Amino acid sequence: MSNATHTALVLPDEIARRRTFAIISHPDAGKTTLTEKFLLYGGAIQMAGQVRAKGEARRTRSDFMQMEKDRGISVSASAMSFDFDGYRFNLVDTPGHSDFSEDTYRTLTAVDAAVMVIDGAKGVESQTRKLFEVCRMRDLPILTFCNKMDRESRDTFDIIDEIQENLAIDVTPASWPIGVGRDFVGCYDVINDRLELMDRADRNKVAGSIKINGLEDPKLAEHVPAHLLDQLKEELEMARALLPAFDRQAFLDGTMTPIWFGSAINSFGVQELMAGIAKFGPEPQVQKATPRPISPDETKVMGYVFKVQANMDPKHRDRVAFVRLASGHFKRGMKLTHVRTKKPMAISNPVLFLASDRELAEEAWAGDIMGIPNHGQLRIGDTLTEGEDIRVTGIPSFAPELLQTVRAGDPMKAKHLEKALMQFAEEGAAKVFKPAIGSGFIVGVVGALQFEVLASRIELEYGLPVRFDASQFTSARWVTGPKAEMDKFINTNKQHISYDHDGDPVFLTRLQWDIDRIQRDYPTLTLSATKEMM
Ligand code: G4P
């Protein structure tokens, strides 16, 4: 993982068949619908509509875990595992709202590939572009699904051009749409020389797939109206001349994306996309770590926390840490070392998100995602090993872009507030800074919506009404450097210094000029807008 060079390892079958990925898209492009169809074909749900019907409907399902019932932990959609064609798919959900970009970034550190869903009429939208950029930072391989082809959509070449130009990535057609809107009849499967016809009558039924012997096969004419067939042949000829052919290495390196056209709501094109994920991969990748990278085929179990989700039940403080296994074969009950604290942890009740039959994980392999219920020991960036002192890297914390002071409505409850804030800081939901001078806390977030979410969670989970107010600061930078210089710096800038929840010093200011001045005055200090979580 997170390694630009996708090396060809020979992995044990159990690991080689794993595909761990996320879906990125602009709201409304069809992520939920596509997820649902993945689960449908993965045998994880029996009918469409179950993903959307979260909450109560799910809670009454008989196979719903007792632990979740008791504690109300809502982990349902964070990670989902299902089988397809002999492959184990692990689909990790990315938060939808742009305000949670940091969370999204960290989620994308736990996957080996991403499916980019775009709306055939709208093309590349703002959120698609942002999420794509995050994938690019990590050279993640991307498969593209152009959705809603049953509606009036743009010209196929236009869509492909837009992706190539907007996102600076080569696009190669894995399928080619035949007709548009009402006239859309299906796709020509470029990879397998097959004709895929869409059945508009039954949205949950996979339509016929007809094996074709190249574009001159007379069978084509039996299924496709003559004018559409002529157009298809002409377009495919142009596509072959103008667009690059599929190159697996370029795909794995993140410089080429294969595109499938389809209609998630009509279950059309979804299986072909899934077959593409299965066939082209990638397999679980090497994970960056210090002092050495972790290879998925190592026999010792290693994993890292990329997300922590707090319990929504105010009566409990339990959380679920989402762990991506980087190597090995995990078995329930294993004792792992929590590298940050060097303490052993018995992992006795991990949750595997096998959507068909959510159950305690008896075993998991490199590439899998496990939920580990805990009382706060596990933080984002933590590594678990069988004893080795190794830490996964590349899971950043970003300097907040919005800072506000927070206080409890009831001043007697300041201690409670501190506890609540620390929990959210550890969960990664906010940055919490304790000023070196004075009392109170400064909370930093990336998007304004997070303040609202925080305020309501503190009230709901801790029974504490709180107030957020404007702070005099607008920027935060972590400061590191030699001790003597740090002491001098901190003493002369006390009114700008705060400490984060790890106790690391942070410089707060409202002026970029201040940051530049300090870099000039203290050349041995580093002011950083990101911090490794480990
Ligand atoms: P999101 O998670 O990316 O936000 O998108 P979601 O799947 O919720 O889909 C957004 C809307 O687009 C939904 O309609 C959904 O039914 C529709 N949609 C998804 N795939 C297709 C497709 O292939 N063709 C067409 N025509 N529509 C599609 P909605 O009206 O917002 O919701 P609903 O009333 O259908 O549930």
Image: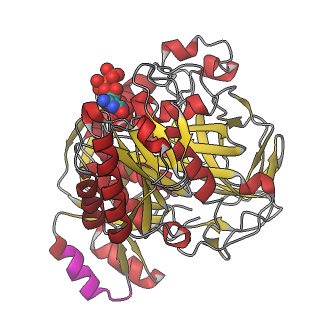
Quadrant of the rendered image containing residue 515: bottom left
Task: Tell me, yes or no, whether the highlighted magenta stretch contains residue 215.
Answer: no
> For the magenta stretch, what is the residue range?
514-524
Q: Please say if 158 is above or below 374.
A: below
Name, please, the residue furthest toward the front: 218
Q: Please say if 459 is above or below 245.
A: above
Residue 119 appears in the rendering: no
Q: Does residue 15 appear left or right of residue 493 in this picture?
A: right
Horizontal and vertical percent for residue 78?
Answer: 53, 37
Q: Does residue 106 appear left or right of residue 351 in this picture?
A: left
Q: Where on the image, by quarter, is ligand 1? A: top left
Please name whichever residue, 67 or 45, is drawn nearer the observer in this view of the structure. 45
Name the quarter where the C terminus is drawn: bottom right
Name the quarter where the N terminus is drawn: bottom right
Horizontal and vertical percent for residue 193?
Answer: 52, 52
Task: Tell me, yes or no, whether the highlighted magenta stretch contains residue 521.
Answer: yes
Horizontal and vertical percent for residue 228?
Answer: 30, 43
Horizontal and vertical percent for residue 101?
Answer: 35, 51
Q: Main secondary structure of the magenta part?
A: helix
Residue 298 appears in the rendering: yes
At 66% from the left and 40% from the top, the residue drawn is: 84
